[in-house]
Amino acid sequence: MTPIPLLLGFVIMSLASLAIYAKGAHSGPLRGHTLVHSAVPFIAATAYLCMYLGVGNLIKPDDSVTYLARYVDWALTTPLLLAGVVSSAYLGAREQEGQAGFVASIVTLDVMMIVAGLIASLAPYGTLKWVFFAWSCAAFVGVLYLLWKPLANIAGQHPAIGAAYRKNIGFLTVLWLIYPVVFAIGPEGIWMVSDAAAIWIFLVLDVLAKVVYAFTSERKLHAALAKSGA
């Protein structure tokens, strides 16, 4: 295990949680955005602390490690991020009908994606691992469809909101597409890269998806709301 990036992840996420709340909106339509996005790195900080202390780190017969705290983190933080994305799509909508249904469906697909990924990680190398990896990817495709098709159409009811929405989900989509690639080439997959390298890559991705995204997405949405006069 590589303790330095795990401890670094704990420190970065802890400070980021405070910074996002301090710098974010405390009134108006983006207040919920701030609250959600400050909670996300706090959860991630807890996961990094668990991994650093060895809590829930399962060493498998092939000497690869499944970090259970990482999957718990993803199962909590990605639904929060997606709920925030759905909410942002409706900022420019003429009607709010259907928002709860989109949140429920996209969160369900997301959680199933994480659970299937965990099963793939725990499964021994072979067909079973790649069946569940493929099933996890299938759920991810469903998430992307909802983000880029019906929700993008809803956000696009107002041009400024729609443009900000597409930029935000474009940023997240690129990052989230890298996660399964790292899984596949890392120790949980074909082991092309070491566990230490995978930890560093996931740390960078987490910082971008949970910290940088929080600041940049709120800035884009704030500008879009100002432009729309909302």
Image (cartoon, rainbow, N blue to C red):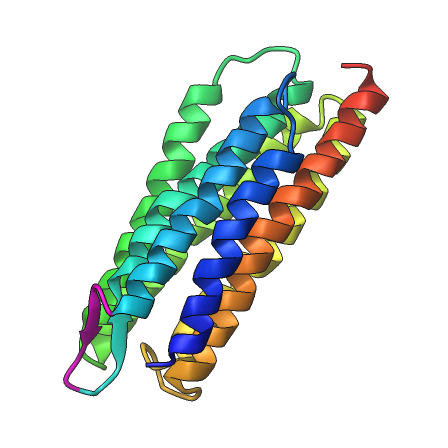
Q: Is residue 2 left or right of residue 14?
A: left
Q: What x and y, as percent, mark residue 9?
A: 47, 63
Can you say whether 220 is above or below 74 in the image?
Answer: above
Can you say whether 2 is above or below 229 in the image?
Answer: below
Nearer the observer, 226 or 4: 4
Extreme left residue here?
A: 61
In the rendered image, which quarter contains the N terminus? bottom left
Nearer the observer, 90 or 63: 63
Q: Residue at x 82, y 15 (%)?
A: 229
In the rendered image, which quarter contains the C terminus? top right
Q: In this view, does 196 lie to the left or right of 144?
A: left
Nearer the observer, 11 or 24: 11
Q: What x and y, as percent, mark residue 85?
A: 56, 35
- Range covered by the magenta-colored residues: 54-61
In the image, is residue 83 part of the stretch drawn in magenta? no
The quadrant holding residue 195 is: bottom left
Q: Which residue is drawn at 38% across and 33% down?
A: 105
Q: Residue at x 25, y 62 (%)?
A: 68
Can you say whether 76 is above or below 94 in the image?
Answer: below
In the image, is residue 60 part of the stretch drawn in magenta? yes
Can you say whether 132 is above or below 41 in the image?
Answer: below
The majority secondary structure of the magenta stretch comes to loop
Q: What x and y, as percent, mark residue 51?
A: 31, 66
Q: Is residue 38 left or right of residue 140?
A: right
